[in-house]
Amino acid sequence: MIDRRLAELASGAATAPNVGIPSPRKVDRLQALLLSIFPEPEESRRIESLFAHDSGFSGETVCHYIREACSR
Amino acid sequence: MFAVSDLHLYLGPSSSSQFRKSFNGYDAQRRVSVAKALSELACPLAHGESPECSRPMGKDLLLLSTYSMAIRLVLQGRADEVTPAVRKSGNQVLCLAVRHHSIELGLKEVDDLAIELYQSLVHKNRAVRLSAGSVFTFDCVYLPLIMSLVIPSQVLVEIISFYNRVGQVSWVRAEGIFDKFYELLRDARDPVKETVLITIGRVGRLGVCPDDFDCAHRFSGLQQPTSLASRLVA
């Protein structure tokens, strides 16, 4: 963690590391996790469409998706 | 980054009426896997890339209501499907959701969850009772590679910690939890008393950190940081 912070300081991202937008690797991991929760074909299609836009996603978008899926 | 309102553009306008998740037929192992996946998702959803587990950056992240809804579904099933291991995993998820619940979102969801957890406090399985109230650990796989942190997970302790952050306006609610503890210590079976005692001991270790006080001050106008546990014990 210290090394990471030092790298941020060196690169000028000292005051506010971008905590809102996960890296592509993390996005892949998040997508895999969501697919493990929603593995059915229709569910998978929707998850993939959720991540298909390279503009990324927000935590609230994913929460909204889960709520939509789980609400009765 | 697209907005929540854009979601229907991607999922279709009728998605909410056509798409309903069900865990019917899931065995215990699959349910535990779902709960673990939700646990792993919690930190990245709440604070993105930051490796430090903190409260959500945005005040509008409805993680607790989302996760409560999902876990209720996971816990619906036959006894052989919803085993103590499943309940324990579900409590882990709820613990993380409470940890990331923003004070600005209010108290009601946390209040409701506390009442639901009273059932787990008297569950016949010790691991379930402990996961509802007190300490066990799990690995947060999301964190970078070798940073597999061991995080204490204890829903009611987390809830009291949340009330502590909120400040005086929530203390009457925390007192309700302590009333439940007293009731169990008086009336419950000895195994339940044992796990309640462990939980109370853990609550007693809670304090108010400066960061917590900032939030509490904003919410309730508290002037001095004060430990809720010390108030209740006094």
Image: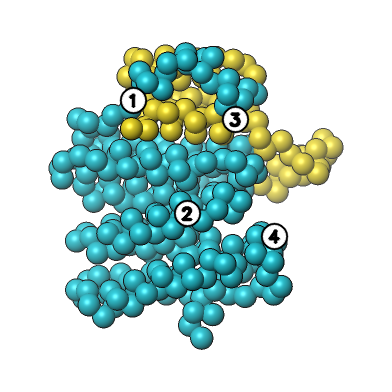
Q: Which residue is mark 1?
A: B20
User: Do badges 3 and 2 share one subunit?
Assistant: no
Question: If you read the primary sequence from the N terminus, does the residue marked by circle 1 or circle 2 appear first?
Answer: 1
At horizontal 41% and vertical 70% (from top left) the residue drawn is B176
Provide the secondary structure element on which disc 1 rests.
loop
Q: From the top left corner, tell me how far across and down residue A16 is, in percent.
A: 77, 41
Mark 3–mark 2 Cα distance, whole angstroms, equals 24 Å
Mark linked to residue A58? 3
Q: Chain of mark 1?
A: B
Q: Amino acid at mark 2?
A: Lys
Is there any visible trace of residue B167 in the rendered image?
yes
Q: CA distance from mark 1 to mark 2?
A: 25 Å
Q: Chain of mark 2?
A: B
Give coordinates of residue B78: x percent, y percent.
Answer: 16, 41
Which chain: cyan? Answer: B
Look at discs 4 and 3 and give the one toward the viewer.
4
**Residue ID for mark 4:** B218
Give the Cα separation between the discs numbered 4 and 1.
39 Å
Mark 3 burial class by Cα count in 10 Å: few <14, some 14-19, many 20+? many
